[in-house]
Amino acid sequence: MKPSAFDYFRPASLSEALALLAKYKDDCKILAGGQSLVPAMNFRLARPAILIDINDLGELDYIFADDNGLHIGALTRHAAFHRRVVDGPLGALLSKVARHIAHYPIRQRGTFAGSLAHADPASEWCLVATALNAAIVAKSIRGDRRISVGDFFNGTFATDLAADELLAEIHLPAMGPGWRTGFFEFSRRAGDFALGMALAALRIEDGIVREARLGVGGVADRAIRLESLEDGLVGHAASPELIDSIAREAWALVTPVGDIHASPEYRRDLIATAVRRALTEAAA
Amino acid sequence: MNWIGRSLPRLEDPSLLRGHGSYVADRIGKAASVRFVRSPLASGAITGIEIPPGATVFTGRDLSDVKPIQPILHRPDYIAIGQPVLPVDRVAFCGQAIAVVVAEDAALAEDIADQVFVDIDTTDAIVDLDTALAPGAAPVHPEAPSNVLVEGRMRTAGFDRAFADAAEIVALDLRSHRQSAAPMEGRGGLAEYDGVSGRVTLTASVQMPHMLRTGIADALGMPESELRVIAPDVGGGFGQKMSLFPEYIVLVWLARKLKRSVAWIEDRRENFTASAHGRDQAFSLRGAFAKDGRLLGLEADLRSNVGAFSCYPVTCGVEPLMALAELPGPYDLGEYGVRSRGVTTNTCMMAPYRGVSRPMLTFSMERLMEVAAKRLGIDAVEIRRRNLIGTFPHRSPTGLVYDEGSYLQAMETAVKAINLPAFRARQTALRKRNRHLGVGLSVFSERTGYGTPAYAARGMDIVPGYEIVDCTMDPSGNVVLRIGSSPHGQGLKTSLAQLVGDELGIEPQRIRVVSGDTDATPYGWGTFASRSMVIAGGASKLAAGQVAGKLKAIAAHLMEASPDDITLENGLARVSNSNRTTEIGALARAAYHQSHKFKGLSPGLHESAVYDPGGTFSNACHVAIVEVDIETGGVRIERFLVVEDAGVLINPMIVDGQIAGGVAQGIANALFEEMIYDENGNLLTASFADYLLPTSAEIPEIEITHMETVSPESVTKAKGVGEGGAIGAPAAVVNAIVDALSPFGIELFELPATPQRIREQLRKAGVSVHG
Ligand SMILES: Cc1cc2nc3c(=O)[nH]c(=O)nc-3n(C[C@H](O)[C@H](O)[C@H](O)COP(=O)(O)OP(=O)(O)OC[C@H]3O[C@@H](n4cnc5c(N)ncnc54)[C@H](O)[C@@H]3O)c2cc1C
């Protein structure tokens, strides 16, 4: 339960951090909140030779909304979302979701960007980013790169980030007042990773769904956006019958993974239930 | 009676709550760090061990003089298996210590351990009960060709007739999955070498310091006088810390070999893989019921997976033989036929864990009662009423004698408290809204505070049971109580101080209890098996009573009265019906400094007493009300109620704490905790991310009501209470889940009842979530 030996850098500026990343590439790892990396190091599952601690980079500690949506800097902690970071449905959704992430002390350190970079398939933020079609800004000494979320996750603990890149910002599209959201998660205990969860966002006008976002997480090697089911919602009233049929389709569509806490059959059941409950909440 | 019965704040707490507790890891100072290299495989032959050059590493070959750990039961059906301290030729479970590294700090020791390569020719691992018992299964140990290490059987004379007369025979297969006691503090030891005397002091996180000294001294072939064992503050044990583990023997061996101090602080993964497990049991029951619901006879085939080795000193018989002897529990069972086996596998050793077999046997009997009630069309409370023990002393078919208890009354009190008719009305109303609530009952007996006869009956080579207490009052009238028992969080020091305070007429704050140091306490057995309040308490009361007798004699002499007329209270000796008093401190001073005056009395105030009782049965009824989400299989406990009878309560707050903690572990047993091995014997739940302890969010408030049956079997009138919470809760919770799901006709026979298991049953019953 002691990590293997490593060297430690605590750069004072982003450019210094990027230079270190460019120099050490695969030999180094970024240390953000440490809530996933440090346990992995203590178990010696991760043995980085060099840690680059980004916690002094005040320039990455920001969160702001503009007309394009919400910009989340790399040092934004989970706890920042306890309160609504932006007026309207998005701020409310993020605040609700944040409470499902781990426990209070962990939320004080763990970061939104760290969750995405870590790419745990059961991470709530990965589901949020996927379902809401986030964009990710990666920086390196080679320049900036904007990655659409659809291209970002490559599987469990695997992303499109290159060894010299730092995930600098997440950009979530704006959500106008016409949007309503729903989120449902099932986990064994308060604060555990989800065994299955779903996020739904509907823009409803005159009782008719005009736009829809629907995603599930914790069930496969990455969060999944269910675009075909979104299409099935648009142009209709989100009636209990329609929601039931969407949940049924989700049950059939997703091929879940199994582990000691949830067999594939069980996860499949959770997907249907989570989708039904998230949509029901959004439609209410 | 002054202090008994008061919820006195615990004398232990000011230091523990302020962070002044002193655990092994707080004491290691400059000792060298020890790290064990552990087997990555469950079964195989060791063909080579590669040690990095220059490193201080020892293997089984270096320790060839050390005797294996080989606990003995004197019974023909027991096969003794020796556990080598470090194996030379083969490994028997994943996590078994193979070599030991000594380095200047813990990180370095771990680095070196990482570079020790062990070559193992792997063989197929035997992991679960069914594989181990299958005909033709490979033996885990050559000494035990059938993989059965211990087997007990009995059958009463009228057994066949009971089954012939039965109106209904209910057959059930029940399963409890493996668990860990998961104490907050893992194991750990500091072995300090004294260069002058050559003695070693082992400070270790243990429940049985004296037993540890005996076991280590035997293994190393040294006299016990050369070893001192200290149990400092211990962060929980629950039975896991009452066995002799190879690591402690190695620590003492290292200290003597290297002539320096060495320390090992176990990490969580070691605790999960290599400490001790329990509750891996499969029971098959057949209950023969009369038409009126009376249980005429019971047939049981009980299998316990005891892992790779036998725990010292209680042996791998502890689960199977406890199950055999106590299965009938609170029920007045006529005829009984049982076979109980302890089965060895390539998994971590089984050792006692709070409740030992009784959570599973209570679960089994309480499920049996529920199923029988349904089949016979009798109310679940009524069927228990017709079977509970009501006359005392009661003799069970296995020969256990139950002292007086309140089996029926406790259940009636609990049923009344939850207002069953009102609950049923609410349940019906909520079902219409697709909400599924259920209520579950669990009635049980808890055999506690048993002395040597109970252990001798098992055929144990080492027979624990008694406790010795030394009680000394110093010249200022304050008391030191030296006990062989070894409390580790139970608040025993407070309870004993209250007991002795009443005996001597002084405040508990004037009584210091010394435990957990073999140099400073009489030989004793430790704290386990719900025994310390009854047995160490009994011996304390007797020893303090002797000191009180002496004080009264001195007081009588000084105040010219008869000793029978002296009472000790509020720090004073008083002549009854008078206002003549003397301070107890003055009497104590006289006992030491004026001893020439008191003819027939030995100087000083120093008494010793032994207590070795037959045992006393506590009893309780637990009730759970749960809500089940039929779509996720999730369970929320809405209410949990305990009606408990543990005799006279010395400190009610401490008793409530014992019950609440036990219930939390029982709820964990019912819903959360499960040690899972894959088919190769790798532990898949080796961290708290996968081995799920409930948190405060999952545990409801626990409502506790007490009954106080006064038993002649305990000199303090207290019965044991340490394990009951853990014993009763699983059955109550699962019965409640089954009640909630009764519209779907679902029965559950497996612990823990996890969401996916519940959902699987629902799916089979046609409760679909997809249309
Ligand atoms: C008990 C417990 C329960 C938890 N439960 C949950 C839960 O329910 N849901 C959940 O989502 N998470 C949970 N977590 C994980 C937690 O949310 C982590 O904080 C999060 O996954 C990682 O964020 P971090 O800032 O701590 O990253 P770190 O642990 O510091 O890093 C994680 C990985 O991301 C990389 N990284 C971090 N930041 C960047 C960056 N800016 N650019 C490039 N790479 C980067 C690191 O190099 C490392 O590989 C839990 C953690 C614990 C300990």
Image (cartoon, rainbow, N blue to C red):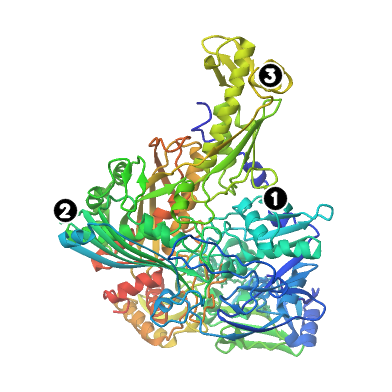
Disc number placed over residue B292 in the picture, else none: 2
Which amino acid type is marked by label 3? Answer: Ala
Are callouts 2 and 3 both on one chain? yes
Q: Nearer the viewer, residue B493 or B593?
A: B593
**Mark 3 surroundings: few (<14), some (14-19) or many (≥20) residues within 10 A:** some
Q: Which residue is the site of mark 1?
A: B22
3D distance between C-alphas at marks 1 and 2: 58 Å
Which corner quadrant of the figure contains ligand 1? bottom right
3D distance between C-alphas at marks 2 and 3: 68 Å
Q: Chain of mark 2?
A: B
3D distance between C-alphas at marks 3 and 1: 35 Å
User: Relative to A29, is B561 on the left or the right?
Assistant: left
Q: Residue at x 42, y 85 (%)?
A: A254
Res. B360 image quadrant:
bottom left
- Residue B724: x and y in percent read 43, 50
Callout in the foreground (3, 1): 3
Q: Which residue is the site of mark 3?
A: B586
Which amino acid type is marked by label 2? Answer: Asp
- Residue B30: x and y in percent read 81, 59
